[in-house]
Amino acid sequence: MDRHGRVDGHGGCGSSTCRSITTPAFSLSNSTRRLSLQLILLFSILLLLLPASLDGSPVRTRKSGSSSVFSLFNLKEKSRFWSEAVIRSDFDDLKSSGHGKVDVLNYTKAGNIANYLKLLEVDSVYLPVPVNFIFVGFEGKGNQEFKLYPEEIERWFTKIDHIFEHARIPQSGEVLKPSYKMSVDKQEHQHLPVVSHVNYNFSVHAIQMGEKVTGVFEHALNVLGRIDDVSGNRDHGDALWQVDVDMMDVLFTSLVEYLQLENAYNIFILNPKHDIKRPKYGYRRGLSDSEINFLRESKSLQTKILQSGTIPETVLALEKVKRPLYEKHPMAKFAWTVTEDTDTVEWYNICMDALNNVDRLYQGKDAAEIIQSKVLQLLKGKNEDMKLLFEKELKSGDFSDLNAECLTDTWIGKDRWAFIDLSAGPFSWGPAVGGEGVRTELSLPNVEKTIGAVSEISEDEAKIATRCYSGKVCYIWRSDWVCYKNSACLRVQKNCACLRVQRFFGNRAITRLLVAITIVEFRLMKDHQAIDILLAEIDIYELFAFKHCKGRKNKLALCEELDERMRDLKNELQSFEGEEYDDSHKRKAIDALKRMENWNLFTDTHEGHQNYTVARDTFLAHLGATLWGSMRHIISPSISDGAFHYYEKISFQLYFVTQEKVGHIKQLPVDLSALMDGLSSLLLPSQKCAFSHHMLPLSEDPALAMAFSVARRAAAVPLLLVNGTYRKNIHPYLDSSILQYQLQRLNDHGSLKGTHAHSRSTLEIPIFWFIYGEPLLVDKHYQSKALSDMVIVVQSEPSSWESHLQCNGQSLLWDLRRPIKAALAAASEHLAGLLPLHLVYSQAHETAIEDWMWSVGCNPYSFTSQGWYISQFQSDTIARSYIITTLEESIQMVNSAIRLFVIERTTEKTFKLFQSQERELINKYNYVVSLWKRISSITGELRYVDALRLLYTLEDASKGFADQVNATLAILHPIHCTRERKVHVVFDLTTIPAFLIVSGILCIVLKPRRPKPKIN
């Protein structure tokens, strides 16, 4: 044998001459000895196992007398038979880290690891959202001199429901009716929940502006307003007025900047004083239908506009003078809720000077000159869509494709502000037939109808009314003729005094008749009886007392005079009980006295005040609901279902599909510059965009032509116009589902792939732009559609397509030749899930509901305007969509890891192993939570770009925590796959003889025998 224990080729002998050695004849062979040994061992084991088997327990610690499997080894109950390394030699046991028995006990008592670490599944993460409600004209100088008190502001507006869950609207089916309207299938697996774990926590603050701010806006309405109908067909007494919303935009933006409210969402509520010269007005961009017709017919005006050498700057230029309204914003306590006039006097002076300049510019100008100024302003303005549209129409001179936008009383600005004008309108818009949540003339609260109907008159106004009461009185029976019994009175004269009295009373029926007062002196007819005059006077006093005396907080002196007069009337009625009067007069007098006994008109009761309070509460509740809707629709709208991740670069792949081949892309009937500018506006400041253009003629691509032909269908769509006319329209359309399937098949062949298809930092958005000659839509009703992996846009020839929507009794017309607005809406839905402004998810209905109140503004998601400029509201919604998706996925990942710890039981045997991972687990979890808090805080300050930079870090941190949980469980799981590591053995003296016998037998059998040499 060599030094390595190997035997050489000579049998292990060291020489070439080896003696042969043989075993004796009597010795056992190796196989026989092995068999004997196995039999002896088997018998011994059966002998030793007999007591344990009789006991009925395979492993059991015994305290006395009874045998056990290993009791013969003389080991106590807590003694060790062998080390734990003997059981598992495939991993190292951990050393104790100093945790005492108390820690082990707490660990085992916890039941599972999640309870021990005190980890619970995350239910909600809150994103702060700062909101300002700014009241203008509610200091007592606006319409109806309505004044909001601080306690009312706090009660109704600063305590609006502040917690909203972020919600997603799943799509299924056709967009017009079923898509967003269908209930959510609770069994259907959603990548992200419909009702999100992320909640919006609104910090609402109400600010009441002073008299000077109200004066600026009232003056702006007078200066910037103009008659809607320039043809002169309407009487100026009831003419409809339009206010230039682009010019009002400058005022709102300057006020927000002056008060330094840019880092919050600002909703203005306007209540300007009602001007009888402007009975009904609204806000609009551009020109009215009458002005467009005037411009179309006046070729000289068109020439004058085209020959204008220089386009003047905006006539309303305001300096940026900022005055901080509060020291720190947001997330800090505001300094005040009511601004004093001294706080806004500087802004007031600047605005009034600018408005006066505009007023002087428009003074003395006729309709043509005003239209010329307005068109030049649009050509110079910042609205790219209006600029491009008017440039095109001026060059063609047609103007037949130019349609007026809707008049509205609400508006969403380009920055973080929107407004409601309670004195404007009212207006209506929405689906013409079959829609819900449509905007009606009663959708907004009306100060005049609610507060004005029950408002208290002043002492001076009461004296004016008294002059009417002091003369003769008459009833008016549902007509303009003042009558009493059989005697005709003169017609009510429309003088100021009586008109004011009629305003005090309103047009409400009292005891089934209307009462009017005339100051015209007239002589009663001879057949008038004295009792009838007294009864008529009582009716008037009763009416006035119920209206202006009963329950009044500040009692009028006139009411005391009427109280004295009522006592005199009682005495006069009692005088009719004499015998000189006939029975009919007596019955009338008795009935009148009984009625007066039940009166309590001039005492200090609170019933009238309660009526006034109910009217105020009704108005404020309606206004609060409207503001609540603004938060749901424009500040934190619902988005489409899906996971929308943040990408540093967005690549728009534009595929223009034409019927015939086009020589150059510039020859396409598409404004590429406007389209790319619009698509670029969807990106955040930290994102970059790239464009690639591809022209795909159907005549040269049979596969694509087949896909287009398969997806092209037609539908008979019933249409009921606003004038009640029924019409059946045939809508040729592309079925988006079929087209998507066909295009995916083409993409599998590689012909449609973009250049950045596999880059994680770049999102590719394929946009298929079909240009077709005949009318063509998508899914029966739309110009574009966002799908899961592409966007489909259809452009066709009709320039005035009558849609299913109406505005103020007129059908909305779509220009199918310019689908840029629809394309941007679909692209933003594909990119970040943005939906039209009228859609929002309702938890009560478990589906989407419609509210067309806020479908306003020149953005792609509004149907009342043709503009497609992205507002800061929508830009923030896109950023929040990215943030919420990452937060949602992080929460899901953390909750999944916590659920694994919930089902992992804690035992004493796993404590040491878990102890080695505990610190790392807690550190990784705390890091994820700290990122949640940091993103929430930064988002609350509206610093979305800074928050987006943390999203990749959050993804890595969440994955790190989940991986650490899985690694910890992997270490603990082998324990469950082995036997008990501690073997409890009981020492029993009765097993000693058996142990000795077995030992002796083993020694005899296993004792080596000396081999005897065999000599040949």
Image: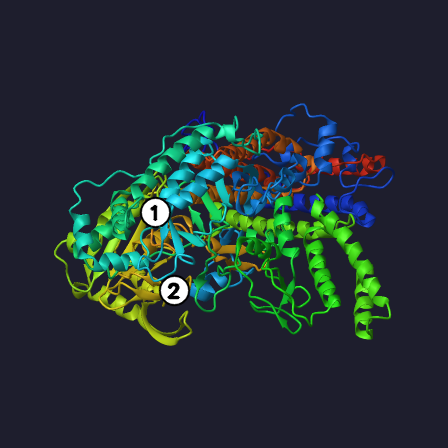
Residue type at numbered disc 2: Gln
Location of residue 873 (image quadrant):
top left
Name the spot of residue 500 as percent of width and height, x first: 57, 53
Which mark sits nearer the N-terminus, 1 or 2? 2
**Does the image show residue 26?**
no
Residue type at numbered disc 1: Tyr
753 to 805, vertically: above or below: above
Seen from the viewer's position, the closer of residues 27 and 294 is: 294
SS category of the residue bearing label 1: loop
How many residues crowd around disc 2 within 10 Å: few (fewer than 14), some, or many (20 or more)? Answer: some
Judge from the rendering whether residue 87 lies leftward or rightward of residue 776; answer left or right.
right
How many residues crowd around disc 1 within 10 Å: few (fewer than 14), some, or many (20 or more)? Answer: many
Residue at 14 percent across and 58 percent down: it is 662
**Does the image show residue 135?**
yes
Q: How many marks?
A: 2
Name the spot of residue 438 as percent of width and height, x first: 49, 61
Seen from the viewer's position, the closer of residues 770 and 762 is: 770
649 to 811, vertically: above or below: above
Name the spot of residue 390 as percent of width and height, x first: 24, 52
831 to 346, vertically: above or below: below
**Residue assigned mark 2:** 810
Judge from the rendering whether residue 690 lies leftward or rightward of residue 476; answer left or right.
left
